[in-house]
Amino acid sequence: MTSPGELERTLRAELRGEVDFGAAARALTTMDASNYRRVPVGVVAPRDAEDVAAALRVCAEAGVPVVPRGGGTSIAGQATGTGVVLDLTRHMNALVSVDPAARTAVVQPGLVLDRLRDAVRPYGLTFGPDPSTHSRCTLGGMIGNNACGAHSVAWGTTADNVAELAVTAYGGAAHRIGTGWAGAPKGLRELVEGNLALLRTGMGGGFSRRISGYGGLDALLPERGVRLARAFCGSEGTLGVVTEAVVRLVEAPRAPVLAVLGYADESAAADAAAGLLPYRPLTVEGMAEDLVRGAAGLPRGRAWLFVEMRDEGAARELVRAADALDAVVVTDPAGQRALWRIREDAAGTATRLPGGEMAWPGWEDCAVPPARLGAYLREFRALLAAHGLRGSPYGHFGEGCVHVRIDFDLVSADGVARFRAFSGELADLVVAHGGSLSGEHGDGQARAELLPRMYGPEVVGLFGAYKDVWDPAGGMNPGILVRPARLDENLRFAVLPATPFAGEVARCVGVAKCRTTDAGGGPGVMCPSYRATGEERHSTRGRARLLHEMLAGEIVRDGWRSAEVAEALDLCLGCKGCLSDCPVGVDMATYKSQFLHHHWAGRIRPLAHYALGGLPTWLRLITALRLTRAANTAARLLPFPGLTRERVLPELAAEPFTRYLSAPQHPPASPHLSAPPHHPAPPAFEARVRAEPGSGPQGTAPTATPTVTLWPDTFTEYLAPEAGRAAVRVLEAAGLRVTTPGGTVCCALTYVSTGRLDRARKVLHRTLTALGDVRTPVVVLEPSCAAALRTDLPALLPDDPRAARLAAAVRTFAEALEEYAPDWRPPRLDRAVVGQTHCHQHAVLGDAADRRLRERAGLVGELSGGCCGLAGNFGFEPGHHEVSVACAEEQLLPALRAAGPDALVQADGFSCRTQIAQLGGVRARHLAELLAEGLAADL
């Protein structure tokens, strides 16, 4: 066989697209969204169909297999392989044309579904199949897996919506297939004509969700019109590579309405689903309480059917006819989106059980005839219990397709054996109910071994013959569907060490919500660096995969010193968007800190880690030595070592926040500011603290005036004291007593973000000692500091009870006003507002209280989602400026340009305000400043 080096050189010579056999490229494609892992030889990103043909010819001559890959969201292992992976998303991602009159579109395989839907929406059209991964799955992947989605009740599977395919076979031969025998590979017609009886009787009837195996093979029967393209769909990359497709479009409902029906339990909902089909719903989706977990807006019940109808009249007719415990009809598009988001995130949220344990794919999408669904689910739950397993079923109840993730132990020998035994028994159960092992996502490696139980040996033998006609050399995605690997081989967990960090990294299941290319103007943040670069290694999933391979040590062999991992993490902004936006809560910012901690251990770090990572120390020293003016002058005139020259450093304030409060020429805003730092807490806080073991003094009587401690974070103290002064004015106007800590305190944010974790622990220990017992709410104006105190502090000092108490005491400015001055009426500003919601506010703290406070103050409008792009030290580090600006250009800067001349600009984060000033040319203010100005205007 040709060596990898020789193959790489030949491919580089023959192709115009990228050829990458490096460790990082291979590591990024070892896994998809399944339990499986296979190590490829290299990755090729072809420019066009000619490149695809050249790659398939070169690989065939070398005897190296090929795996076509789209978004990599396959959950059965079919997007992984040991040969050359074709990345069809980088270049072959175009919408070639749209014919609104014919209701067709010509697409390349790497086109993301949402891009197609966005393009045809102005014509009142859409593509019917819509998997929950619609924001990142590709049309090629959908064709490969015969994807369906929630609307298949109305519009069918991908195979039902494909008219023609351009396919390149292993070796480079091109085929154009549609209806009829034109374009068929040699021998296919003879194979079909020699097996007509088997195709008519052995394929399992007309069940719409029969996706398993080459489930569409009976489309080649003469009475079914010899639909070659339809039969090709669902072949999971085992027959050839789709280079172009003609797809059918459908009329999009103008104003669909969502009816949510509540039932006593999951079985009742499943039993009811089939009875709703005569009302011609667009969707009939089912979910139970063990997955929904307290979501708002649902009717009474413990299980629900989400039924989308074409209009309100049809929805209300359905509700009247349904035998439901309770129901709501949602006409508001925003309300519908909020409910659908629960369903779309289920592939990730189902991975975390209510107790926090992880559950995994493997039996993700079995399907049975809808009339059998209730009985099947009852037996399925019993089978889970018999094996000591847990899972939360949900899915397309209207078509009998059930998704579930199960808490398999895929590490120990006993756990893997249980996984195998359960899989066999579940396959038998599905077949006994007349179902399909796969109802939409394909079999891959997870279920292909069990296909004989569903189809019998004759049909499975015919599947093998069908593959051999298309792929006689066996080079297309071997080990998948035909002559498959065992379902308990190649498990991705087997290569990981038994460490807590490895368990965190393995949490990424690859659903790739981080790969969305458009934040859509919504509140989401994840993943800003991927949206800026479009490269997998800069997505949350890509970084998790590289960390996984670093721990495995097979491809990435330098461990914590890995240059590949360091390069990928370099553009992680530490925004923590993945903590909230990733359905399984991957926390890449924390993983980055851990990596940097080990990567630079015992070595000289980059200068930026000392300059920006040690920012609190430097600013405290400069201020103590009265060198503020000199430092500002030097920053304007001289480049700062280790920082980018494309940024101007923010000026230090002439007077720190706490010095202003204590200086004789600036008397305290109220007499109590010179009082001791700790005061009895208001009743609500004291009651909660008392409930915590070992916390707070007992029996302290609350005072009539609630007291809060205003945290002098580094940014407020030295760079933006005006925000602190404004906060004092507003909090006092609201009837609160304000105090500041008596000693030097720091949240250690800058040390954490640069991976100086040992230093961070020392700083936090010192801070807790300086604070003593926390008896009051701690108001933190800087969102990143508040987030650090709430999450990083208890994580870094898990054995110190003071850390948990301080974390529990932290309040944002808006939270403090809402909780401790609920009757206070803010000044009416009655102005439009634009600006930036801080990433950490979105991901860790939440901004519900801020939204309510803005509304009460008459501030109209939404702050930008996404990320401002400066992200603390990130935007000041060399090599980051371009990405930093690109992040700001996504939502923030366009919003500022579109704002009216009288609009107020708000950003509670100092980084956000700095980015707005430097790139937007306007001054943004903290919400406290806006309210303080309103108070002054009222005087």
Image: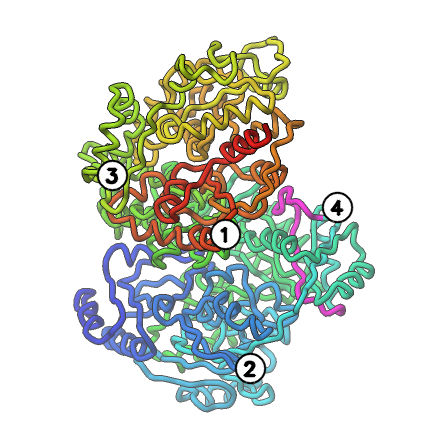
Q: Secondary structure at mark 1?
A: loop
Calculate the distance from the C-alpha at mark 3 to the C-alpha at mark 1: 44 Å
The residue to which callout 1 is attached is: 899
Highlighted magenta segment, given as a residue range: 278-298
From the viewer's side, name the closer residue of 692 and 384: 692
The residue to which callout 2 is attached is: 219
Calculate the distance from the C-alpha at mark 2 to the C-alpha at mark 4: 44 Å
Marks 3, 1: nearer the viewer: 1
Please give the label number shown on residue 599: 3
Question: Which colour assignment does the render follow?
Answer: rainbow
- The first of marks 2 and 3 along the sequence is 2
Q: Does residue 546 show up?
A: yes
Image quarter of the N terminus: bottom left
Q: Is residue 37 left or right of residue 929?
A: left
Calculate the distance from the C-alpha at mark 2 to the C-alpha at mark 3: 56 Å
Seen as rendered, the residue at the extreme right is: 320
Q: Quadrant of residue 831?
A: top right
Q: Do the numbered discs 1 and 2 sit on residues whose CB atoms are within 8 Å? A: no
